[in-house]
Image: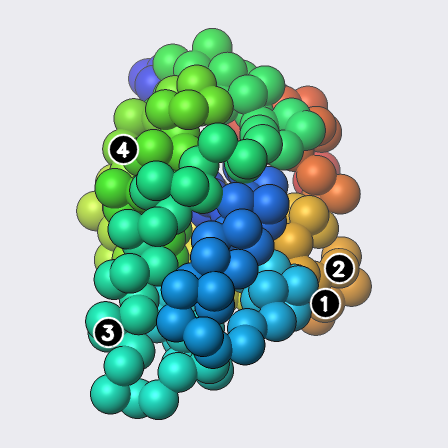
Amino acid sequence: MNESAQLTVGFDLDMTLIDSRPGIKAVYDLLAAETGVEIDSELVVSRLGPPVELEIANWYPAEAVTEMSDRYRALYAQYGVADCLALPGAHAALDSIRALGGRSVVVTGKHGPNARLNLDALDLRVDALHGTVFGPLKGAKLRAEGARIYVGDHLGDIEGARAAEALAVGVATGPYDAAALRAAGADVVLPDLTGFPDWLGDYLSGQPA
C-alpha cells in the first residue's frame, strides 16, 4: 500500500503559513478610529491565534463583542488581506505534500471566508479549509480530515493536535518560541517552514525526527 497516498497534513494559518500581522494591525487601527475606542494594535498582533471575539473582548464591553467582531471581519475582508505575506517555506511545505500525493488542510481560528481570501491572494493551495475553531476544538476537524500531522505556531495548535491524536509540529514563527512549544508538548519544533519538506521526508521514511 502506498502510505503517502493517505498522507494528510493540517496547518494553522496566521503566523504558521502567513504573516497576517500587517493586515490585522491595520484593521484594528481602522476599527479603533471608527469607534473611538483606543486599541493597542501592536499588542494585538503579538498574540495572534484565538478567535477574534476573545481579542475584541479586551477592548469592548461584553454587549458589544459580537457586533464589533462582525465589523472587524467585514473590515478585514476589505482592507486586511492585501498586506499579508506568505511566511518563508509556506509554498514549499504545501508543494512537498502535494508531490507525495498527499493532502493539506487548514484548520484555523480565523473566520473561514477571510482565511480563504488570504489563501487565494497568496496562491497557497490547500485541499480543505475549516475556520473559526481553536484549541482542542480543532481536533474534531483534523480527525474528520484524517490528518495525522498538525503544524502550528500556537499552544492552542498543540492542543488541537493532541485532541486529534496527530503529531504536533510546532513552528517558532508566532508568539511562542521553540522552548515554549516544546514545553507545551510539541513532538517536533522547527524554526519555520523552510525545513518542513526535509523533515517530512525523514519522518515518512522512518528517520529520527
> Of helix, strand and loop, which one carries label 1?
helix
Front tag of 3 and 1: 3
Q: Looking at the image, is mark 4 or mark 1 earlier in the sequence? A: 4
The residue pinned by badge 4 equals 128
Q: Which residue occupies the foreground of this view, 130 or 204?
A: 130
Classify 10 Å Cα crowding around label 1: few (below 14), some (14-19), many (20 and above): some
Classify 10 Å Cα crowding around label 2: few (below 14), some (14-19), many (20 and above): some
Marks 3 and 1, how far apart in space? Answer: 32 Å
Q: Amino acid at mark 1?
A: Ala
Residue in view at x 24 percent, y 74 percent: 66
- Apparent side of residue 157 relative to residue 196 in the rendered image (left or right): left
Where, by quadrant of the figure, is residue 81 drawn?
A: top left
> Of helix, strand and loop, which one carries label 2?
loop
Can the viewer see residue 104 in this picture? no
Per the rendering, the mark at residue 66 is 3
Q: Looking at the image, is mark 3 or mark 1 earlier in the sequence? A: 3
The residue pinned by badge 1 equals 180
Where, by quadrant of the figure, is residue 203 drawn?
A: top right
Where, by quadrant of the figure, is residue 196 drawn?
A: top right
Q: Are marks 2 and 1 in contact (CB under 8 Å)?
A: yes
Marks 2 and 1, how far apart in space? Answer: 5 Å
Q: Amino acid at mark 4?
A: Ala
Marks 2 and 4, how far apart in space? Answer: 28 Å
Locate the N terminus and report the quarter of the image it occupies: top left
